[in-house]
Amino acid sequence: MVASGRGSTIRRQEHHESDSDRPEISRRAALVALALPVLSGCLSVLPYDVKVSDGALLVPREMADTLRGPTDVLELRAEGRSFYLRRLPDGSFSALSSLCTHRSCQIGAEADGYVCPCHGSRYDLTGRVVDGPAERPLPRYQVDTTSAGLRIIAG
């Protein structure tokens, strides 16, 4: 940079980092670094078609193991019905109907529970009504742990 004043010229040398002075970071690494704090609290809903045996839904151990906490949800589908399965904060599993008890609309899973897009009913992680118009909790199904995975009695 050159600046001039009364009768004198001042030269200041600017320091430029060379490419070897800067750490290399890929575009992907930068995006991951920026997005990770935001995405860490996001909900992950994975649709999964399950087998039915003797009236029970069978979830293989490898699928059940994908449920690390309440923000990981499996949408189980079998015989024209769907259910939500998630691991609760205490480590137990919760299997609930995916239909709102108000008008049978398909509900959506959220990080802290479930919401009905039709009329705004909200349910907590266990299916209990938090905000109406629904008055009844979501039907809850028994979840048994077996050596092969989970068995959900969807009677």
Image (tube, grey):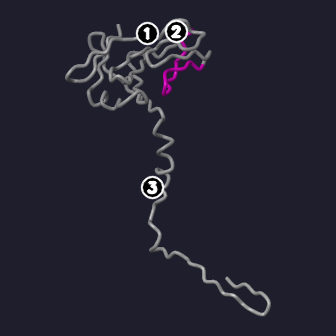
- Seen as rendered, the residue at the extreme right is 6
Instruction: Name the image quarter holding the N terminus.
Output: bottom right
Q: Amino acid at mark 1?
A: Pro
Q: Which residues are magenta?
A: 101-117
Q: CA distance from mark 1 to mark 2?
A: 8 Å
Res. 32 mark: none
Residue 79 drawn at (x, y percent): 38, 15
Q: Where residue 18 appears, x then y in whole percent? A: 50, 76
Give the percent coordinates (x, y) of residue 89.
Answer: 38, 24
Q: Quadrant of residue 131?
A: top right
CB within 8 Å, label 1 to label 2: yes
Instruction: Say the numbered circle drawn on residue 101.
Output: 2
Is residue 115 positioned above or below 101 on the image? below
Q: Which is the main secondary structure of the residues drawn in magenta?
A: loop
Mark 3: few/some/many CA within 10 Å (<14, 14-19, 20+):
few
- How far apart are the alpha carbons under marks 2 and 3? 44 Å
Give the residue at x 30% y 10%: 55
Residue bearing the label numbered 1: 139
Front residue (pair 117, 41): 41
Residue 117, given in percent of the width and then of the height, sits at 59, 20
Q: Residue at x 48, y 40 (%)?
A: 39
- Residue 29's mark? 3
Q: Please, what is the three-letter code of the amino acid marked with disc 2?
A: Thr
